[in-house]
């Protein structure tokens, strides 16, 4: 079974496939490097991150989440996320299409043990990922 961070990334991809194209994932490593931090929120005008954050959390390889336990199937994880955060019916937003495609390609290209990292306390390839990310707002300060 995939580690919890990878399952969250795949869940966001599945949510996009189901039409929740307004959602973004912003994730990185804690200063200690032991925890994966993430936030899932809703874009505004195709821009992210935003102040419309649904969940912000820190996880390791396994453990419970606010909306589900990590032993659920990907389908259950996705459905419970929709129910827990009471997401409206999917919104097909053409302004987010390039982000959804970029995110799908990025998540599909990740190795089995690779974490999706956009920030950390050390230099790395994540810096280039953000430069190429559609809608990323580098001036955002949550």
Image (tube, grey):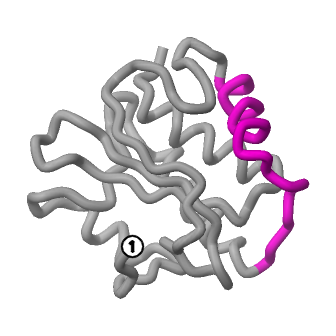
The quarter of the picture where residue 123 lies is bottom left
The answer to whether residue 85 is magenta is: yes
Up the image or down, 31 lies above or below 53; here it is above
Find residue 48 and report its horizontal and vertical position in percent: 52, 74
Up the image or down, 98 lies above or below 56; here it is below
Q: Residue furthest right?
A: 89
Residue 103 as seen in the image, left or right of residue 128: right
Q: For the image shown, how many numbered marks are present on the structure?
A: 1
Crowding around mark 1 (Cα neighbors within 10 Å: few <14, some 14 to 19, many 20+) is few
Find residue 64 and report its horizontal and vertical position in percent: 48, 21
Assign a secondary structure to mark 1.
Answer: loop
Residue 25 as seen in the image, left or right of residue 12: left
Find residue 44 and report its horizontal and vertical position in percent: 65, 79
Residue 92 as seen in the image, left or right of residue 113: right
- Residue that label 1 marks: 142
**Residue ID at (50%, 47%):** 107
The answer to whether residue 96 is magenta is: no
Find residue 101 and report its horizontal and vertical position in percent: 64, 63
Residue 38 as seen in the image, left or right of residue 126: right
**Residue ID at (67%, 84%):** 45
The image quadrant where one finds the C terminus is bottom left
Q: Which residues are magenta?
A: 74-94
**Residue ID at (63%, 16%):** 72
The quarter of the picture where residue 137 lies is bottom left
Foreground: 36 or 7?
Answer: 36
The quarter of the picture where residue 83 lies is top right
**Residue ID at (55%, 32%):** 66
């Amino acid at each position: 079974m995939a580690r919890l961070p990878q399952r969250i990334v795949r869940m966001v991809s599945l949510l996009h496939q189901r039409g929740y194209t307004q959602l973004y994932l912003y994730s990185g490593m804690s200063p200690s490097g032991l925890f994966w931090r993430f936030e899932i929120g809703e874009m505004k005008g195709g821009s992210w991150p935003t102040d419309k954050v649904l969940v912000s959390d820190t996880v390791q390889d396994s453990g419970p989440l606010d909306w589900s336990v990590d032993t659920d199937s990907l389908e259950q994880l996705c459905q419970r996320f929709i129910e827990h955060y009471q997401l409206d019916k999917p919104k097909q937003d053409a302004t987010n299409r390039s982000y959804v495609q970029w995110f799908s390609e990025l998540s599909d290209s990740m190795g089995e043990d690779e974490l999706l990292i956009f920030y950390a306390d050390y230099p790395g390839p994540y810096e280039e990922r953000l430069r190429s990310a559609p809608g990323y707002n580098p001036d955002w300060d949550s």
